[in-house]
Amino acid sequence: MLLFLWRSSWITIAGVLLTGVISGLSNAALIAFINTRLVGQMNIPYAIGWFAGLALTVLVSRTASLYLLNRFSTQLVRDLRLRISRLILHAPYPNLQKMGKSALLSHLTEDVTAIASASELFPVLCINFAILVGCMAYLSWLSWQLALVLAGIILFGVTTFNFFKEIPLRSVRIARGEYDVLGRGFTALTEGVRELKLHRRRSEAFVSQSLSNSAEAYRRHSFRAAAAYLWLNQWVQLLYYLTIGAILYAFPLWQTLNQEIISGYVLVFLFMMSPLTIVTNSLPAFSRAKVSLDKILQLDEKLVERSLAERPAGLAVQESFTSLTLTGVTHSFHREKENRNFTLGPIDLEFHPGELVFLVGGNGSGKTTLAMLSIGLYHPASGMISWNGCPVDGGNRDAYMQNFSVIFSDFYLFDELYGVDAEQHRGAVEDYLQRLHLNHKVEIIDGRFSSVSLSQGQRKRLALLVAYLEDRPFYVFDEWAADQDPEFKHVFYTELLPALKARGKTVLAITHDEKYFYLADRCIKLDEGNIAAIEYPQGYAGQVAVNAEWPRPAQTETSIS
């Protein structure tokens, strides 16, 4: 932990150490000065000057140490959270899926907070440790023989403490793992609250079997760690009182000690009680911080699989392209619900500018997986993806992904237009809001939506607005129309998608709306991870003419340009 803090900002930590040691030694000198005044005569003006000087030194150095560390700890929390956030953004998406949201949130909250709490205790630990060292130095000056015996007792106490400290540390590690389990339970509670409220037996079973078990496991191991540290602290306290008893009753039998030395030892030892308690009580916080720091350092190994040669480079974001080609692409993963491996491919496809492609098939056929492969979030197990004839690999994957605007079925809508200059596109924004029938519900103020508390269909329209403003060459929509009313679903298929096509954009839309298949340049049907058929509009025209409620448009007008 100290090494981590030192590497984070050695100048600040050096300042904290220096001021902390000065404060601690000044404290020890102050108690020694008080003891000297109690057992002997001193010149009053001289004594007042020294007392005031030492007291002022203690206050100034303690304030400086705490100020430096408080500033450092707040910066450390900020830097750790930003570091983890950037690590998440640069990590392969499948790795993030394996970890889960709750585990990532635990790193951003629980682990960072534990490290911050320990760092805030660091100056207090330095000050009190320096007090203990200064007091021992003063005791050695009073009687070095007695100080040697005390050093032996302290060495014995430290040795036994280190021998048993792994017991609570083990419980801290287990408790931290149980916290992740508990976090997953809380995520399920908040995201599944509607389903739980509608099914009493399910909600009762969820609380009693899942939440209660994980909460109890976390409580049990946290208590074991606290109890173990309690016993270790009491062991230190026992040695402390045994030492005072030995000074008062045993040492005088072994060696003649005058009353001044005995009273000095007892006074200093009583003064050492507080810093000793602070030092021992801070150890649990440092144990939790060590476990959390280990978890954060392990996060690098879990998320990052890229070498230095695989950092983003190569492809640039382009307004248009000539082709996107998938050659022999495959991807496999394990389906937990079905307890079997699913393999997509091999897939051979090519997309061109200004093309409207529908991706169709039953649930579980691999449509979303193919889309995720196409946009670069999933990596092919075999085969190759090429953009404008340039193979996509780890070195240019990040740049490759910048060519896509995607609205996922489980999309997230940010309340601010990050990365988009809303003022520069003010006219287009107002026009889009009107055409998306949202102008009476939402406006953009200082680059932020006035509200995102809308229906799912309206939120998807806002996401579509953001995609328009991004103006990427390739658009992917995963079941976008599923939450729209029939009227706006018709607008989406007959106006919005053709308008994107007319602007030279390539659109890949995952859909089940068969009556609009005739609008596509191609309909790619997947079945069990393989391309079952590729059909063209005329292949669907007869069926659509019979079943469609909406007439086929004679000429597409670009309502949104």
Image (cartoon, grey):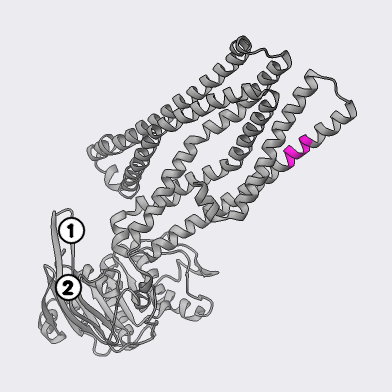
Q: Out of 86 and 26, give the one closest to the viewer.
A: 26
Q: Circle 2 sits in a helix, a strand or a loop, which is it?
A: strand
Mark 2: which amino acid? Answer: Val
Q: Residue at x 57, y 40 (%)?
A: 121
> Mark 1, mark 2: which one is toward the viewer?
1
Q: Using a 10 Å C-alpha cutoff, classify the residue at mark 1 as few (fewer than 14 neighbours), some (14 to 19) or many (20 or more).
A: few
Q: Above or below — where is 108 with respect to 400?
A: above
Asked whether residue 518 appears in the rendered view, the answer is: no
Q: Quadrant of residue 546?
A: bottom left
Q: Residue at x 16, y 69 (%)?
A: 344
Q: What numbered label is drawn on residue 360?
A: 2
Q: Above or below — where is 431 with respect to 303?
A: below
Q: Out of 285 and 237, give the one closest to the viewer.
A: 237
Q: Which residue is mark 1?
A: 334
Asked whether residue 149 appears in the rendered view, the answer is: yes
Q: Position of residue 14 (x, y in %)?
A: 62, 50
Q: Circle 1 sits in a helix, a strand or a loop, which is it?
A: strand
Residue 556 within the segment the image draws in magenta? no
Q: Position of residue 418 (x, y in %)?
A: 47, 69
Q: Residue at x 67, y 12 (%)?
A: 256
Q: Using a 10 Å C-alpha cutoff, classify the residue at mark 2 as few (fewer than 14 neighbours), some (14 to 19) or many (20 or more).
A: many
